[in-house]
């Protein structure tokens, strides 16, 4: 996202999102993940870090130092296994669910998947529905140049909502709106930022994964 978010508004918006959760309830939890940063399984979870890398596992949102550092450390380059990363993320969240928590996923992207074969959007939809995890989605970019139709279908089919931020500066407003709504309606929120190369082949962007649990 060097070209459409050079000032890393996404990181600022992520931190504001955490602050919003903290002001609502200090028992909320958050974790930050990314993908396509490197190959290998550095944390020993059985998942190649290229598809899901733990930068900060779930902690209470009062641990702003750890969460903010992780948000700032996520990479900006690499491929975009969007649906494969969601596939693993769904398992990661489901297998670590805690009594008294609900869960949802909020995914932010600026383009389309390019490295998830054989996992498809339908694969993600089916798994999300079987786990009872709705996926909310934010698409960054002009819908005239980036096709978010498939991502919108993932959100709608799993019980989530799709929102479009045409420019990076709108992310703070969108994240706050999503955070407010989700914190009122769900016990756990998973916020994921992922990288997508835009249609121009010279650009390979990355976003991060920000996972938030709300109690």
Image (cartoon, grey):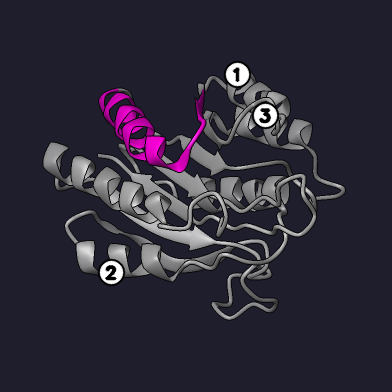
Which residue carries the number 1 mark?
156
CB within 8 Å, label 2 to label 3? no
Which residue carries the number 3 mark?
148
Please tell me whether mark 2 or mark 3 is closer to you in this view. 3
Camera sees residue 26: yes
Earlier in the chain: of badge 3 and badge 1, it is 3
User: Where residue 139 is drawn, which disc sits there?
Assistant: none
Say what secondary structure mark 2 lies in: helix
Picture residue at 66% right of the left edge, 30% below the top? 151
Horizontal and vertical percent position of residue 167: 48, 37
Picture residue at 58% right of the left edge, 70% below the top? 45
Q: Is residue 25 above or below residue 61?
A: above
Q: Is residue 24 above or below residue 49?
A: above
Viewer-closest of 97 and 136: 136
- 16 relative to 13 in the view: left or right: left
Spatial CA distance of label 3 from label 1 is 12 Å
What residue range appears in magenta? 163-184
Viewer-closest of 22 and 198: 198
Camera sees residue 187: no
- 181 relative to 111 in the view: left or right: left
Say what secondary structure mark 1 lies in: helix
User: Where residue 66 is drawn, which disc sits there?
Assistant: 2
- 75 relative to 126 in the view: left or right: left
Spatial CA distance of label 2 from label 3 is 32 Å
């Amino acid at each position: 996202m060097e070209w459409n978010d050079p000032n890393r508004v996404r990181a600022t918006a992520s931190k504001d999102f955490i602050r919003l959760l903290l002001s609502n309830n200090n028992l909320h939890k958050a974790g930050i993940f990314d993908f396509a940063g490197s190959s290998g399984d550095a944390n020993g979870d059985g998942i190649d870090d290229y598809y899901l890398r733990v930068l900060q596992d779930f902690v209470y949102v009062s641990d702003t130092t750890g969460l903010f550092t992780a948000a700032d450390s996520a990479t900006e380059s690499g491929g975009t296994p969007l649906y494969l990363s969601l596939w693993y993320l769904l398992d990661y969240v489901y297998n670590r669910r805690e009594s008294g928590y609900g869960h949802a996923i909020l995914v932010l992207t600026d383009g389309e998947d390019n490295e998830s074969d054989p996992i498809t959007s339908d694969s993600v939809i089916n798994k999300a529905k079987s786990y009872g995890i709705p996926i909310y989605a934010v698409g960054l970019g002009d819908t005239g140049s980036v096709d978010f139709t498939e991502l919108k279908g993932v959100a709608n089919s799993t019980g989530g909502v799709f929102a479009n931020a045409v420019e990076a500066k709108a992310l703070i407003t969108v994240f706050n709106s999503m955070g407010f709504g989700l914190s009122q309606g769900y016990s756990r929120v998973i916020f994921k930022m992922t990288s997508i190369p835009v249609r121009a082949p010279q650009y390979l962007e990355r976003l991060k994964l920000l996972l938030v649990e709300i109690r």
